[in-house]
Each structure stands twice: as structure tokens, then as C-alpha cells.
Amino acid sequence: MRKLSRRGRQTVLIVHLVAAGAWIGIDVIVAVLVMVGRFGSGLETRSLAYRALAAFVVWPMLISGLVCLATGVLLGLGTKWGLIRYWWVLVKLVLNVALCTVILAVLRPGMGAVGDYGRDLLTGTPDPVEVSQLFYPPAVSLTALTIATVLSVAKPWGRRGGTPARKPATERPALTRTANSA
């Protein structure tokens, strides 16, 4: 893939940062709803928190994660960092794919039961579904997204083995014409 222009890189980077910010914000909202559902005062408030989790969390979170993934891949392929040239980029890529997979494979299938639990709270016969485990998704996701943010800023660990460093254009030997070349 050819390198992104300066304006192209800036545009993709802005979309990447906004999507990452949205993802973090959604995770914070999930944490708040989980805490209100678990410890809130009044069954109506707790019920509403669980029903909101079931209705509104998965798709915005997944979409922001996928936008981060797509823009991250574009930035990796279209800039000097490469997609798997540096450890910090590879770790961010793995974290993003893992979190999106967890959203689809673990979080999404359980949201129906969470919504049912919220509705059943109002009737006084809550489903025996275990909702105390809901603390873990935002805790894990926020931790992983914080690590990804730190990696983006600190850029630790250097290049991966087997990926040779490209010399900047100023350090490359200049091509000179010889008398034999015409």
C-alpha cells in the first residue's frame, strides 16, 4: 500500500482517535450502568440500568471498536509504523481484535438475559441469571484500552525481529551516473 498523504494521515488519525474516545466513553457508561444496576437504590432504577445495558451497549461499542480497527490498519499500512513492524503496533492490533471478538462472542449473546433480568426485577421475580459477572467486561475493556493508549503515546519495545529498518531518504546512498551508464 502506498503511504498516506499528510492530510490523509491526519484525517484517518482523527477518525481513529474519535472512535477510540467513543469506545472508552461507552465502556465508562457500561461501568456506570453495571454499578447502578447492582447497587442502585430502587428496583425501577436498577431495572432501567440493566435494560439500558441490554438495549444500547453492544452495537455502539462494536462499531467504535471496528472503526478503530479499520483506521488502525489504514494507519499501519499507510505510515512508517507499519502494521506489524513494531511491537507496540502489533499489541494494539491484537488487543483490538480480541476486544471486538469478545464483544461479539461473549457480551452480545448474554445481553438478552441481562434485559430479561432487568424486566423481571420489576415483577419481583428476577431471573436467576448471574449479573454480578457484568463488572468484568468494562474492567477488562477499559484496562485494555488504557494499555493501547499508553502504547500509542510511549511507543515502547522498538522493532520486531526480522523487520529491517528502512533508512531515511537522506541516509540512502545517492545514485550516481558512471561513464558506462547511459
Image (cartoon, grey):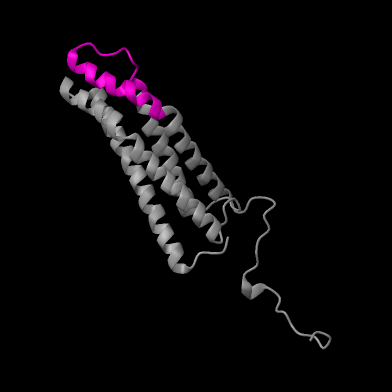
92 within the magenta span: no
Q: Quadrant of residue 13?
A: bottom left
Q: Where is residue 75 drawn, in percent x and y?
A: 50, 57
**Residue located at (33% from left, 46% from top):** 22
**Residue located at (45% from left, 38% from top):** 100
Q: Please provide the residue range marked out in magenta.
A: 107-133
**Residue located at (56% from left, 61% from top):** 80
Q: Is residue 80 above or below residue 88?
A: below
Q: Is residue 53 above or below residue 95?
A: above
* 104 or 91: nearer the viewer: 104
> Which image quarter is the C terminus in?
bottom right
> Which image quarter is the N terminus in?
bottom right
Q: Quadrant of residue 128?
A: top left
Q: Where is residue 69 drawn, in percent x and y?
A: 47, 47
* 170 or 104: nearer the viewer: 104
* 137 or 121: nearer the viewer: 121
111 within the magenta span: yes
Q: Where is residue 2 drawn, in percent x and y?
A: 57, 64
Horizontal arrangement in the rendering, residue 9 relative to residue 159 (left or right):
left
**Residue located at (42% from left, 48% from top):** 67
Predominant secondary structure, magenta span: helix
